[in-house]
Amino acid sequence: MMIIEDKYIKLSIVVPVYRSATILPTLVQQTQEAMIKEGLSGSFELILVNDAGPDNSWAVIQSLAATHDFVRGIDLRKNAGQHNAIMAGLNHVRGQFVAIMDDDLQHPPTALGDMVRALESGYDVCYTRYLNRQHAWWKKAGSRFNDAVASVLLDKPKDLYLSSFKAMRREIVEDIVKYDGPYAYVDGLILNVTQSFTTIDIVHLARYEGESNYNFRRLLSLWLKMATSFSILPLRIATYLGFVLTALSLVTVVFVGGAKILNPEYQAGWGSLIAIMLFIGGIQTLCIGMVGEYLGRTYLKLNGKQQFIIGSTTWQGTGLHEQTRV
């Protein structure tokens, strides 16, 4: 898909939307106010991507687009997940710079100006670092684990926090949207195309209304996307475990055989035998599952599973950049 630049649009803001109908009017208002203060009134666009949520978010987006020229809405036919919904928005941006933010107003729109200035200074990507993160303890722990794993699997700089509130230059977006796999992980794609990063500190606000849509299952799914889409290290770890277990098995055979020869009355321990069998069986199952994860993603890509399917937009498509990815 080709993205067409609009010389009048300096900043495109992509927001994946899921069950946030009551928050959207305030989000639009605060974003507009922040852009006016930054002198970007008339030169920004806010792309709201409705990820097929169960509420009336799409109706609200249509209403907002009808009353605000800078609001553009995309409605997905089925739920695609946060990162795939972001990819749908990235495929339709028109600005020189592109920001990604959540729909719950925990990301202050007032920080967008500082992010743009960081990009204007020459950096490719500007991430944000939360000064007072407003998340549950288990989500913080999961993020720390995800951050540590990303440093190993994706060669992420250790001092870089992969926050969901970020901005990037247009050239980076053009490289990112070339990815056509069914399961996108935006931060992995960013790390795959550039090493030019900077970070700004922001105040992480409490959720404006309702509860977070993320749960443990979705966080685990996101981790699997990161682990299996951009690195073969898990497969190598499985191979190393195979070698290690084989060596341990040989050592165990020699030890048990020698003990039996030296002590004919030596009774083998059933408990230790069962424990070893269960351990080896568990490792084998884990490794087979890891291989299956890779094969499954390859199978889905070969069968043309789409990242997202656009049902409708709040504008009339007139160019290649307005078409649905196939």
Image: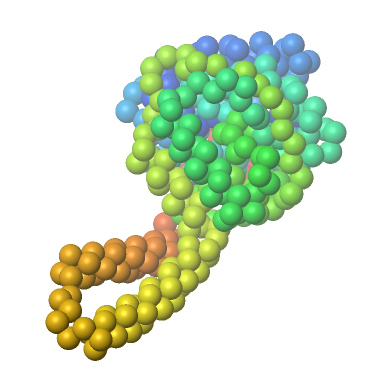
Q: Tell whether 107 sits left or right of 252.
A: right
Colouring used for the render: rainbow
Can I make out residue 132 in this image? Answer: yes
What residue do we see at 33% from left, 65% from top?
283
- 133 in relation to 145, above or below: above
What is the residue that sits farthest to the right in this orientation?
A: 121
- 123 in relation to 305, above or below: above
Which image quadrant is residue 45 in? top right
Q: Which of the pair 39/265 is nearer the observer? A: 265
Where does the image place residue 324, in percent across and percent down from the top left? 51, 47
Q: Tell whether 197 sits left or right of 148.
A: right
Which image quadrant is residue 90 in? top right
Where does the image place residue 47, in percent across and percent down from the top left? 57, 29
Can I make out residue 2 in this image? Answer: no
What is the residue that sits farthest to the bottom in this orientation?
A: 261
What residue do we see at 55% from left, 16% from top?
205
What residue do we see at 38% from left, 17% from top?
210
- 237 in relation to 123, above or below: below
Q: Which of the pair 218/239 is nearer the observer? A: 239
Q: Which of the pair 186/270 is nearer the observer? A: 270
- Total numbered labels: 0
Where does the image place residue 77, in percent across and percent down from the top left? 39, 40
Where does the image place residue 150, in percent across and percent down from the top left? 57, 49
What residue do we see at 39% from left, 63% from top?
290
